[in-house]
Amino acid sequence: MRLATWIGSVAVMTLAAAMTACQPQSSPVTRPALPTPTAQTVAQIRAQYAKIDPDARVGVVQGVLAANCLAAVGDVPVADLAAGDVITFLDNNGQTITMGHVVPAIEKDPVYVYVKYDAPKAGGRVPAKGDIAVRAIK
């Protein structure tokens, strides 16, 4: 009976740790939301990264599943991204929000790549629909 109670306690603690893994390290700061990047902003960022790294890929966050710390990134050649690729999330001003990595999809998705994002720094925020996602090698 004690073993079953101990196993149950460990399972609950593991689940709680997993659920809070991508939460901000402290309470997020309330601040006005920035407007989402326009198509022109995304094109400018693509051009900037292409000059630095022709293999860079720039996409746009299409949706977020916050409970699982996952962002769906579209408007990018899905075949050019692979599981494990490091992604930087940027806001409308090109400032880093947080980092993440491409995760393997359960089923092939021709439109979106899925990125598990890291917990934002204290006072930061998680990625949101419309944010920019960049994979740069250099």
Image: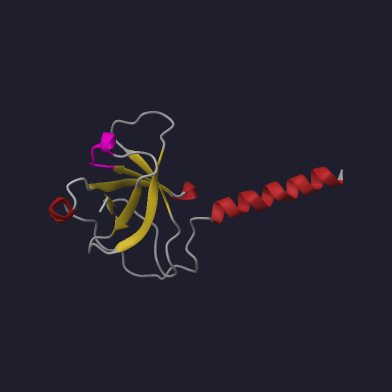
Seen in the image, is 4 located left or right of residue 71? Answer: right
Q: How is the image coloured?
A: secondary structure
Question: Percent position (x, y) of residue 87?
Answer: 33, 51
Image height check: is 124 above or below 44?
Answer: below
Q: Quadrant of residue 113?
A: top left
Magenta part of the chain: 74-80
Write the residue at 24% across / 56% down: 36
- Considering depth in this image, is 105 or 38 the residue closer to the camera? 105
Residue at 25%, 46% in the rendered image: 59
From the top left corner, tell me how far across and down residue 129 is, in percent: 31, 51
Which of 35/95 is in front?
A: 95
* 54 sits to left or right of 69: left
Farthest-out residue, top: 107
Where does the image place residue 56, in percent across and percent down from the top left? 22, 48
Q: Nearer the viewer, residue 137 or 80?
A: 137
Q: Where in the figure is residue 96, as x and y percent of width and height?
A: 31, 62
Quadrant assignment for the N terminus? top right
Q: Residue at x 36, y 55 (%)?
A: 127
Q: Residue furthest right?
A: 1
Viewport quadrant of the C terminus = bottom left
In the image, is residue 1 above or below residue 117? above
Q: Quadrant of the rendered structure where residue 107 is? A: top left
